Image (cartoon, rainbow, N blue to C red):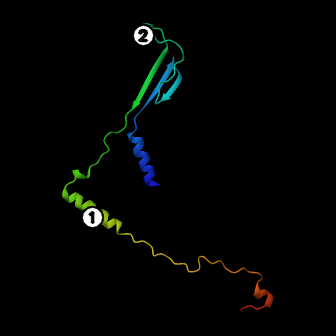
Amino acid sequence: MISLSMAFIVMLSTMSFTVDKHFCGSHLVDQAVFSKAETCGMSMNAEDETHCCTNEKIEVEGQDELKISFDSFDFHQQLFITTFTYSYINLFESLPKQIIPFKDYSPPLLVANIQLEDQVFLI
């Protein structure tokens, strides 16, 4: 579960996306992620100074530098990492396999309680 969540975090940190917003005055008309926002239908000519519509684009850049090379460590650091990993993996022992001899056999059917029928009780 932890490895899945860490992989998801790495994927989200490296992902880049763009949020495109279209405003008509101060009212948000459309907002789109990964695509262009739809307009309200009013023309936005460059020579027209009286238009009230604006477009806003927010770009979120992901990380590019996630690669850590094992070759950048010197010999002593590599030796420490490999020794630590090997000793940590061998630190844990597996549990012995439990043998259940009558696993495949079902118990006999209990037809009647014999102690009650014979009135034999341990005191």
Q: For residue 14, which quarter of the picture? A: top left
In percent of width and height, residue 3 lies at: 43, 53
In percent of width and height, residue 25 lies at: 51, 17
In percent of width and height, residue 87 lies at: 31, 67
Name the residue at the left extreme. 75
In percent of width and height, residue 1 lies at: 47, 55
56 over 90 or under it: above or below: above
61 over 43 or under it: above or below: below
26 over 121 or under it: above or below: above
In the picture of the structure, the residue carrying the numbered disc 1 is: 83
The residue lying at 47 percent from left, 27 percent from top is 35
Q: What is the quadrant of the C terminus in the image?
A: bottom right
The residue lying at 32 percent from left, 39 percent from top is 64
> Closest to the observer: 105 or 86?
105
Name the residue at the front extreme. 104
In the picture of the structure, the residue carrying the numbered disc 2 is: 46
Q: Residues within 10 Å of mark 1 (few under 14, many from 20)?
A: few
The residue lying at 55 percent from left, 78 percent from top is 100
